[in-house]
Image: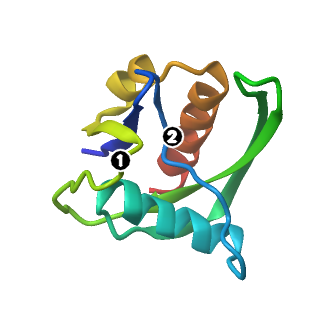
Amino acid sequence: MILYVIVMELDGHCGLPKGHIEKGETEKETALREIKEETGISAVILDGFTMQIAYEMGNGNMKQTTYYCATYDRQEIILNDSELLDVKLLPFEEALSALTNQKQKDVLIQSNAFIMRTR
C-alpha cells in the first residue's frame, strides 16, 4: 500500500512537507533535507515528476514551491520539527481529504497519477 506523508502545521492546516532553500542547496537537496527534518524519513526523489505551485501567504506575499515525488522504505516517523503538530502516513484518499489547500491537493493528485503510471 502506498502511504503519503502529510504534515499538520501549528495553525492546524494539513499539507505536504516543504521548506526554504539554504545557501548552496539545490531544490532537490532542500526537499530531501526538509522531509528528513520534518518527519525523520530518509527519502529518495523519483525522477520524472516536478510540479510548481504559487500561492498567496497570509501576509499577502506570494510564495512559489516546487514539489517532487519521493519514495521511502518503511521508517518510523520522528516529529522533530517545532513548526508542526503532527505527521501522518495516509493512503491516497485519506491524504487527499486531509489536505487543506487545493493547490497541494492538485499536487497530490498529479503525483499519485505519476506513481500509478510508473509502478
The residue that mark 1 highlights is: 82
Tell me where residue 66 appears, x and y as whole percent.
Answer: 71, 51
Residue 119: image location, x then y, percent: 44, 56
Closer to the chain start, of discs 1 and 2, is 1
Residue 5's place in the image compared with 9, above or below, is: below
Please give the name of the residue rendered at 41% of the width and 17% of the height, measured from the top-left corner: 97
- Residue under label 2: 112
Q: Residue 103, how many percent across, how many down? A: 67, 26
> Given the image, on which type of amino acid does mark 1 rest?
Ser
Taking the spot 43% from the left edge, 59% from the top edge, the residue there is 35
In this picture, is 69 found above or below 106? below
On the picture, is 119 further left or further right than 30?
left
Label disc, if present, on residue 52 of the rendered structure: none
Left or right position of 77 against 15 = left
Direction bottom: furthest residue:
24
Give the vertical position of 72 relative to 53 (above or below).
below
Q: Residues within 10 Å of mark 1 (few under 14, many from 20)?
A: few
User: Which residue is outermost to the left?
Assistant: 76
Looking at the rendered image, the disc whose residue lies closer to the viewer, 1 or 2, is: 1
Above or below, 88 against 46 in this view is above
Q: Please state the total of marks drawn on the protein image.
A: 2
In the image, what residue occupies the spot 56% across and 39% down? 113
Residue toward you, 99 or 4: 99
Q: Residue visible at 70% across and 22% down?
A: 58
Give the residue type at disc 2.
Answer: Asn
- Marks 1 & 2, CB-CB < 8 Å contact: no
